[in-house]
Amino acid sequence: MPEITSVDALESTPHAEVFDVDAPRTVRLQLEADDRMPKHRHPESNVVLYVLEGTLELTLGDDSYDLEQGNVVRFDGDQPISPHALTASAALLVFAPKTDA
């Protein structure tokens, strides 16, 4: 059976796990305007980020990308990443385990 949940119901914490299962790990990230996450990596994952609302500046390595509601980006988590909320924002992130294929 599929696991179904409401992303909108996960607003009580900035980093809410969407599902109980951790593969692929799925997180709802909520940031207030001007909040910034420090640079970090997810070397074991390929990451998909979907902007649910607001605008984000996403730093990947040495480059920055302005993202708005409805934008989706896929990237290798083995580079330094840092999301910065230009406005109050929410995003859905999926951390897909890397495979050898």
Image: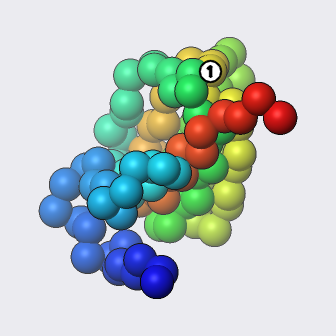
For mark 1, what is the residue?
A: 78
Q: Nearer the viewer, residue 35 or 61?
A: 61
Image location (x, y in percent) of residue 34 = 35, 40
Closer-to-camera residue (60/10): 10
Whether residue 26 sits left or right of residue 80 in the image: it is left
**Residue at 67% of width from left, 60% of height from top?**
71
Residue count near mark 1 (Cα–Cα under 10 Å), binned few <14, some 14–19, many ≥20:
some
Q: For the view shown, which residue lies furthest in the front direction?
A: 1
Residue 74 seen in this snapshot = yes
Residue 21 coordinates in the image, percent (x, y)? 37, 57
Give the x, y percent position of residue 62.
68, 16
- Quadrant of the rendered image containing residue 74: top right
**Among the 4 quarters of the image, the one containing residue 10:** bottom left
Is residue 81 something that shows in the picture?
A: no
**What residue type is disc 1 on?**
Asp
Query: Residue 45's spot in the image, x, y percent?
Result: 59, 34
| Left or right position of 49 against 71 | left
Q: Residue furthest right?
A: 101
Residue 3 falls left or right of residue 76: left
Instruction: Identify the residue at horizontal 41%, vertical 77% (top origin).
Output: 3
